[in-house]
Image (cartoon, rainbow, N blue to C red):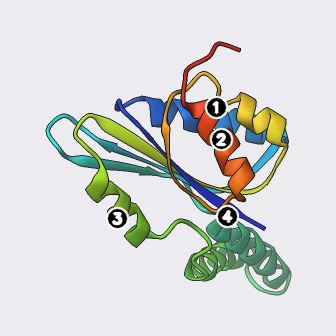
Amino acid sequence: MSNIIVITFDNEDEAKQVRESLKKVDRGGYLSLDDSAVVVRDQAGKYHVHNELDRGVKVGALGGGLLGLLLGVVFAPIGALLLGAAAGGLIGSSFDLGISKRFIKDVEASMDPGTSAIFFIVRDADPTMALSSLKPYKGEVYHTSLDPDDEEHLRKILSKRTDS
């Protein structure tokens, strides 16, 4: 089961730093991120959304590429591979497995100038590794689909910056 987590920060850079930290844990195999987005509201009040490719598009493109490769054995290899990957990406994105743009807009409306937020969907995680990667940051949990005990633990970790 996937969980969506939204954390807000009182500066423009911290959400980006958290995403990089989570990506390192993901590459280490301790976390499976399905999607992530960072929203920054600059001092002038303008919003900047830095979205990652969601898992649905990746899975669709990979599946479509493989289908295209199989068709390419019979027809033109490169053209079928590219067409299959493009079609698979479109099909994967239509499943809307990622973070809703409407939800992002709702959170943006609550952000003050000079702040940031990170949205991420976690499919699977080693809780110890995932939470320890968040200890250097201070933020506020805006929304989660975690169970109440895990959410409270996350809130405590983000309530103060620690070096570890």
Residue type, numbered disc 3? Asp
Label 3 CA crowd tier, 10 Å (few <14, some 14–19, many 20+):
few
Task: Tell me which residue sits at (40%, 62%) in the image.
Answer: 104
Q: Position of residue 58 (x, y in %)?
A: 67, 64
Q: Position of residue 21 (x, y in %)?
A: 64, 31
Residue type, numbered disc 4? Arg
Query: Residue 98 vs residue 102: left or right?
Result: right
Which is closer to the viewer, label 3 or label 1? 1
> Which residue is under mark 1?
157
Separation of marks 2 and 3 at Cα, in angstroms: 22 Å
Farthest residue, direction left: 44
Q: Quadrant of residue 5?
A: bottom right
Q: Secondary structure at mark 4?
A: helix
Q: Secondary structure at mark 1?
A: helix
Q: Nearer the viewer, residue 115 or 48?
A: 115
Q: Nearer the viewer, residue 10 or 90?
A: 10
Query: Residue 15 vs residue 10: left or right?
Result: right
Q: Quadrant of residue 41?
A: top left
Label 1 CA crowd tier, 10 Å (few <14, some 14–19, many 20+):
many
Q: Position of residue 43 (x, y in %)?
A: 19, 34
| Of pointers 4 and 3, the one earlier in the residue sequence | 4
Task: Tell me which residue sits at (38%, 71%) in the image.
Answer: 102
> Which residue is under mark 2?
154
Q: Are marks 2 and 3 in contact (CB under 8 Å)?
A: no
Q: Secondary structure at mark 2?
A: helix
> Which residue is under mark 4?
55
> Which residue is under mark 3?
106
Residue type, numbered disc 1? Ile
Task: Tell me which residue sits at (62%, 73%) in the image.
Answer: 97
| Of pointers 4 and 1, the one earlier in the residue sequence | 4
Query: Residue 113 vs residue 87: left or right?
Result: left
